[in-house]
Image (cartoon, grey):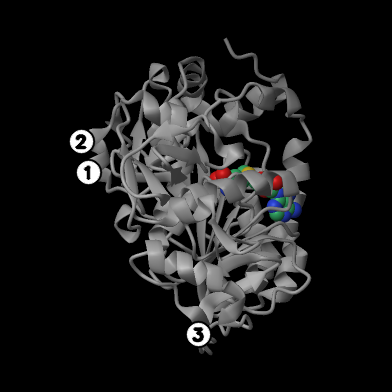
Amino acid sequence: MLILPETYLARMQTLLGDEYDDFIQSLQRERHYGLRVNNLKITTEVFENQSPFHIEKVQFTSNGFYYKKEDVPAKHPYYYAGLYYIQEPSAMTPAELFPIEEGDKVLDLCAAPGGKSTELGAKLKGTGLLVSNDISASRAKALLKNIELFGIGNSLVTSESPERLATYFSDYFDKILVDAPCSGEGMFRKDPNIIKSWQPDSNEAYNSIQKQILPYAAAMLKPGGYMLYSTCTFAPEENEQVIYHFLDEHDDFELVTLPDRDNFSRGQTHWAGGEAFDMEKAIRLWPHKIRGEGHFIALLHKKGHHQEMYKPYASKTKEKVYEDYTAFEKAYLTCPFDRRRLEVIKDKLYYMPDDIPSLKGLRILRSGLYIGELRKNRFEPSQALASWLKPDMFKQITCLSSSSEDVIRYLKGETIRTDGDKGWHLVTVDGFSLGFGKKTNHMLKNKFQAGWRWM
Ligand SMILES: C[S@@+](CC[C@H](N)C(=O)[O-])C[C@H]1O[C@@H](n2cnc3c(N)ncnc32)[C@H](O)[C@@H]1O
């Protein structure tokens, strides 16, 4: 039984009127468990057929599923292969509705731990650029892991304030997601700790943070670009009123109508504090109407048009510096990386994205795909490379079955037996890349990244 703050309940009663009882009853029912398929690695249809879990489609998304609590998908080898992200179903909606196109430059400004970034990256299909940022350095580490696990290589992961980021990326992005920090009223059922941290003045406090963030996001968006604002809270102060205030101060922006899907509700103009903008164009998800916890989503368009000046990346690293990598590439990879984009930074080799500004001084956790490390007279491929590779891109494969004991032993960091030649092997589970191993005699030395292991 959830015990909710009196001030919160009184406000929800005023807002919801006749619907209030349904809303309260929905919060007393069991929460919904969801996972979203990583379409960079597997199609939704193949996952649906091969899934080892009791799954049921989330009707308002293209690749989301409900699973049963007893399934525990975080304890399955497919999780370690990055085949899905465990995500509350309504939280799937912002990235689902954002019209990302191949080649776009996309910023996820408040991205950690990556629930929405991983879907934005999947929608780019390896093209364009995804910049995933979070102001919190510790949360950005979890974000980096999820970006790498998903096999997203065309990305930068940064940990910056919106203000500082805006000095580097003026008028740069085609699409920006602002999944704003909020009071989390839609998360009460999922995480009762959020109830404890909620205070009567939380909505005003977050309102002021949200209003501070949006103008920096606006400055980073190209004229003609789109910005999607979302929260997982119900308070109008953090939703309609933030968007109203933003539009009032930015006449170069306009609200765009988001599509209706099963049981979606609309934003409310009379909650916005003024009548000048039609908040019905935005969307509200309510836990008594959909099988999910709740969200607010608004899509904004920056008027005008921007003329592109595309700048391909030009590496400063001489090929001789990474000749040990070149030997590895010849021996094991079926398709080489473009030398123009290979850069060595502090003995680490990266595949850099095209068309990025100077990043000097930015707090960067990852620029591009981290391919591996140049050690003394040898090259050591990275876990990020293993997650990014499709099995047909690597010449030596050790195939494990998801039902075998070996796959768990491998994920725990143990040595396993394998056939095939000596040297590097890409270890797969049911045909999906997991990590590397290095064969000497009959044994495969485990190279699965220590921090990612099965505990
Ligand atoms: C709702 S969470 C983001 C969830 C994430 N989009 C996802 O789907 O996994 C909001 C994030 O905003 C970050 N944050 C807080 N204040 C911020 C600020 N002033 N600028 C940018 N990010 C901020 C928090 O660290 C937090 O990770």
Q: Is residue 308 above or below residue 158?
A: below
Please indicate, yes or no, whether residue 275 appears anywhere in the rendered image: yes
Which mark lies nearer to you, 3 or 2? 2
Identify the residue at the far top of this view: 1
Decide which of tag 3 and tag 1 comes sooner along the chain: 1
Q: Are marks 2 and 1 in contact (CB under 8 Å)?
A: yes
SS of the residue at dot 3? loop
Q: Residue tagged by mark 1?
A: 45
Quadrant in the picture for the N terminus: top right
- Number of numbered discs: 3
The label on residue 305 is: 3
The label on residue 49 is: 2
SS of the residue at dot 2? helix
Q: Nearer the viewer, residue 21 or 256?
A: 256
On the image, the x and y values in percent for residue 48 come to 24, 36
Q: Is residue 190 above or below residue 176?
A: above
